[in-house]
Amino acid sequence: SNIESANKWFESHLGFSSVAERRKMRPGSIRINPEDSEQLLRVLRPSVLEMILLTTVSITEAILCDQLASRDVGSRPANLRQALDTLNKKLKDNDRLDNNGWAIQAMHEARILRNCIAHGSGVWSDEAVNQFADQFGSASLKPISGEPFTISVDDIFAYRRAAKTVLN
């Protein structure tokens, strides 16, 4: 099966003995009624996009914090917000903010969205709305606490481009 093939990509090395129960996949053990496929896709599509955004932002956070720490900017930033603020200052000091400031702001958007997905199931929280207001006080359209949001494929590519720009 495809799942068994995927299990062969990498051998598990967790660094500990997991208590999670492992089972062999039997052919046909996952059955999807073709009549249910459209309903399943309605649920899976946004979940996959949210997972891609979560991963993109989390990896960007780890790499950027490591890059800044290795470039002797003081202590390692504790989170993406601190890392972006540090990078913003460095770019401003080097007169490079005009060309790259958009990417830092876009990563602040992605950071706030990531937190809403991870902690609020894709619904704007009071904390996220406040963070958005702090970061983008002059925005013409602002999120509303309690409102759900939807991420598009276009959003994913835009935030990936911003992440690549920030890391370069």
Image (cartoon, rainbow, N blue to C red):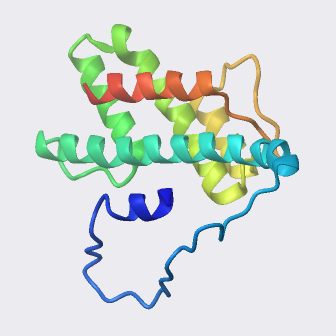
Using residue 50 as the reference point, say whether residue 13 is left or right of it: left
| Residue 79 placement (x, y as % from top left) | 39, 51
Q: Report whether 146 appears left or right of 41.
A: right
Q: Quadrant of residue 95?
A: top left
Above or below residue 86? Residue 153 is above
Q: Position of residue 164 (x, y in %)?
A: 34, 26
Whether residue 147 can be seen here = no
- Residue 7: percent from the left, percent from the top? 39, 65
Which residue is found at the position 36% from the left and 15% from the top?
100
Q: Which residue shows up at 49% across the image and 79% down it?
A: 24
Image height of 2 relative to 94, above or below? below
One can see residue 132 in this view: yes
Lateral position of residue 79 relative to residue 140, left or right: left
From this view, report whether residue 37 is shown above or below residue 25: above
- Against 143, residue 62 (above or below) is below
- Nearest to the observer: residue 111 or residue 130: 111
